[in-house]
Image (cartoon, grey):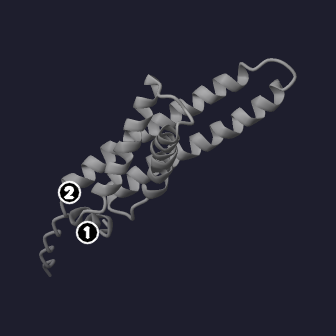
């Protein structure tokens, strides 16, 4: 007996360019949270005096939160890349809120002064917002509903 001819495999849908762009725009978010976590850890462990131990604990806790956001961003990038649900909303939303909206509001209220080091985190917040906007386009919505 002869074997029936195998049906040709269905062509896998092509990943939209907006999904590729959104994943690439989310990469600076992960880098920003990693740098922020290492910086706060370094500052906390450099503390001296009576409250140094308390600063170490606080710095380690904040580093843990930053590391969690790094892992959530990288995991969300992977899920979106493979066609799963949009898992970049939480880390991108946290980035937008903490490094774009809050400093902007504080600047408008005159509570803090402008510093040149504020530019890079605010740009990363804008990139995170752009990634979320790109993931709301129709081709990206079709892709994130796709299961390989």
Estimate how packed mark 2 is, as few (under 14), some (14 to 19) or many (20 or more) residues with alpha carbons within 10 Å.
some
Residue 108 in the image: state x and y as whole percent. 47, 41
In screen coordinates, is 117 left or right of 139? right
Estimate how packed mark 1 is, as few (under 14), some (14 to 19) or many (20 or more) residues with alpha carbons within 10 Å.
some
Q: Label 2, on which residue?
A: 16
In screen coordinates, is 138 left or right of 88? left
Residue 12 in the image: state x and y as whole percent. 20, 64
Checking the image for residue 142, the label placed there is 1
Q: Quadrant of the N terminus?
A: bottom left
Out of 51 and 111, give the one closest to the viewer: 111
Farthest bottom residue in view: 1
Residue 105 in the image: state x and y as whole percent. 49, 44
Q: Residue at x 32, y 54 (%)?
A: 81
Circle 1 SS class: helix
Q: Residue at x 75, y 20 (%)?
A: 47
Q: Are marks 1 and 2 in contact (CB under 8 Å)?
A: yes
Out of 22 and 110, give the one closest to the viewer: 110
Does residue 50 sit above or below 25 in this rendering? above
Q: Quadrant of the C terminus?
A: bottom left
**CA–CA distance between discs 1 and 2?**
9 Å
Q: Can you tell which quarter of the image residue 54 is in?
A: top right
Does residue 80 sit above or below 67 in this rendering? below
Farthest right residue in view: 50
Residue 125 in the image: state x and y as whole percent. 41, 42
Q: Can you tell which quarter of the image residue 147 is in?
A: bottom left
Q: Can you tell which quarter of the image residue 15 is in?
A: bottom left
Query: How many numbered markers are drawn?
Result: 2
In screen coordinates, is 55 left or right of 33? right
């Amino acid at each position: 007996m002869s074997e029936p001819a195998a049906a040709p495999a269905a062509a896998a849908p092509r990943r939209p360019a907006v999904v590729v762009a959104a994943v690439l725009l989310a990469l600076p978010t992960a880098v920003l949270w990693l740098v922020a976590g290492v910086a706060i850890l370094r500052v906390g462990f450099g503390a001296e005096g009576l409250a140094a131990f308390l600063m170490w604990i606080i710095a380690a806790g904040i580093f843990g939160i930053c590391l969690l956001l790094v892992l959530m961003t990288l995991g969300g990038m992977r899920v979106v890349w493979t066609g799963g649900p949009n898992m970049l909303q939480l880390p991108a939303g946290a980035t937008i809120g903490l490094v774009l909206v809050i400093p902007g509001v504080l600047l408008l209220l005159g509570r803090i002064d402008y510093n040149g080091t504020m530019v890079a985190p605010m740009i990363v917040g804008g990139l995170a917002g752009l990634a979320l906007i790109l993931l709301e386009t129709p081709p990206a919505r079709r892709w994130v509903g796709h299961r390989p």
